[in-house]
Image (tube, rainbow, N blue to C red):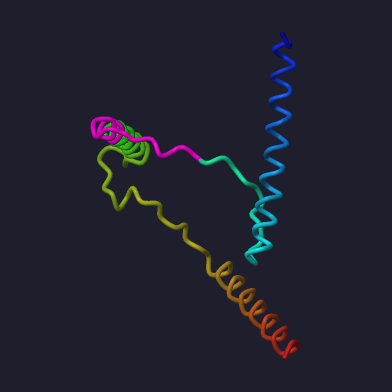
Amino acid sequence: MPDIETLQMALIGYQAERRKINEKIAEIEGKLKGVPATAKVTAPKAGRRQMSRAAKERIAAAQRKRWEQFRKERASKHSPSKGASKAAAKRTRRPVSPEVRQKRIEALAKARAARAAKRRAAA
């Protein structure tokens, strides 16, 4: 009686040969039909798993519970301090001095001029 390991290795080898042969057959059939062959011929997949209505409801309930927990945690992190209104809790912009504002305006004008010159040179 042959060794089991030898039989298993032979089976693996024959399956690999069968896969190669199936790929070659698909390639030849594709050439005959004028359609390029697919990259690989794979084994047919099993059908989709069916899930009961009860299982779907359990999954949906668990997901709703997770989202509720997430929203509670997020609300507690971002809640305004005691006694403060929501408007005050919002982040306000720091005031910019007139000198800094003027520098920004000049830098923007310079950038726009450089962009316009670049467009003129390209045209």
Of residue 30 and residue 103, the one placed in the foreground of this image is 30
| Image quadrant containing the N terminus | top right
**Quadrant of the rendered image containing residue 69:** top left
Q: Position of residue 53 (x, y in %)?
A: 24, 34
- Which residue occupies 62% across, 71% down? 103
**Image location of residue 67, percent across then percent down:** 32, 37
Residue 48 magenta-highlighted: yes
Q: Magenta span has 83?
A: no
Q: Quadrant of residue 116?
A: bottom right
Image quadrant for the C terminus?
bottom right
Start and end of the magenta stretch? Answer: 45-60
Residue 46 position in % (x across, y down): 46, 37
Q: Is residue 44 above or below residue 115?
A: above
The vertical placement of 112 against 81, above or below, is below
Q: Which residue occupies the foreground of this view, 68 or 46?
A: 46
Q: Which residue is rendered at x = 59% and y = 71% of the image?
A: 104
Residue 113 relative to residue 101: left or right: right
Residue 75, horizontal then vertical, whole percent? 32, 39
